Amino acid sequence: MPSSPFWRRCFSRLYREPKARLTEHNASAICASFAWHIYSDDNAGRLAANGYRIDPDSTKLWVAGSEHIFPNYFADTKYLIDPQHALFADYLPGPNIYKCPADKYTVPVGGQTVSRIRDYSLNCYFGFSNPANDNPCSPNYRAFLKTSDFTGLDASSLFTFIDVSPVNICYSSFTVYMDFNIFWHRPSIEHDQIGTLAFADGHADIHRWTDPETLKLARDGGNGDGGHFAFVSGSNPDFGWIRDHTTVRK
């Protein structure tokens, strides 16, 4: 497990961010991004596995997320901080880094109503590996499994972690369909329509979501009822911005 120098480097990176954009939420995005980079450094450039869990014996991912029909993944912090379940557990041992303070939504688990534990997901084009038979990445676009896969690209324009709509988040990955106008996962609008993203070069920034279609879908998540399949206008500027910052065409 990384020692205190990990945190010193993390917070050193925080204080190099523009002060106007430095918020608690940006700090979470930067620390998640930093863990992502250190993990690849520790693993010969291989990116942390991404996707979603389908059973306890599935490939271990950066953190464990799953479908809405498995609510324990949204309520039990072991899926974030237990090394048996999360690759980042050795880097980010506290669960609060993954939680947006503006998320007041709850999830029913075992007859109780509990707070959701995670609001960040990782761009599916970075490290998607499980389940292999449900990979959403288009063969027409570049998927990244190693840091060398995006060498020569503008890493500052490719997002990694994104603040997801609380009623829509499920997988560890953030699904983006590059060939279809389907808004499967939607960004969070809990901060006055402003979301936080981290990028492949390690910086974090904010982005305002503006289209009425996006704002409606961010409140209508589709919790296991098929609502993830939301077809949107090809002129939706938010959907276009996300796709422009997801990957590049081969």
Image (cartoon, rainbow, N blue to C red):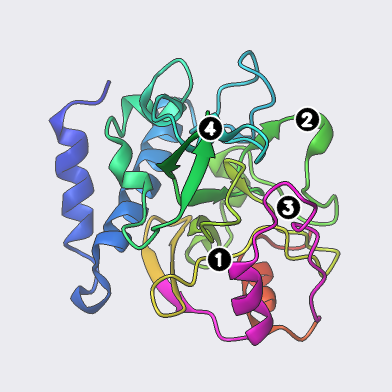
Say which residue appears at 64% left-offset and 45% top-offset.
Answer: 144
Q: CA distance from mark 4 to mark 1?
A: 20 Å
Front residue (pair 80, 225): 225
- Considering the numbered disc 2 on the image, is that residue within a helix, a strand or a loop? helix
- N-terminal of the pair, mark 4 or mark 1, is 4
Mark 4, residue position: 73
Crowding at dot 1, Cα within 10 Å, few <14 / some 14-19 / many 20+, comes out as many
Of circles 4 and 1, the one toward us is 4
Q: Are marks 1 and 2 in contact (CB under 8 Å)?
A: no
| Residue found 39% across the figure and 48% down from its top | 33
Disc 3 target residue: 142
Was residue 42 drawn as part of the magenta stretch in this picture? no
What residue does disc 1 label? Answer: 187
- Report the residue marked by disc 2: 132
Residue at position x 36%, y 36% in the image = 38
Q: Nearer the viewer, mark 2 or mark 4?
A: 4
- Residues packed near mark 3 inside 10 Å, few (<14), some (14 to 19) or many (20 plus): some
Left or right side of 37 for 2? left
Q: Nearer the viewer, mark 1 or mark 3?
A: 1
**Residue 152: quarter of image:** bottom right
Can the viewer see residue 23 in this picture? Answer: yes
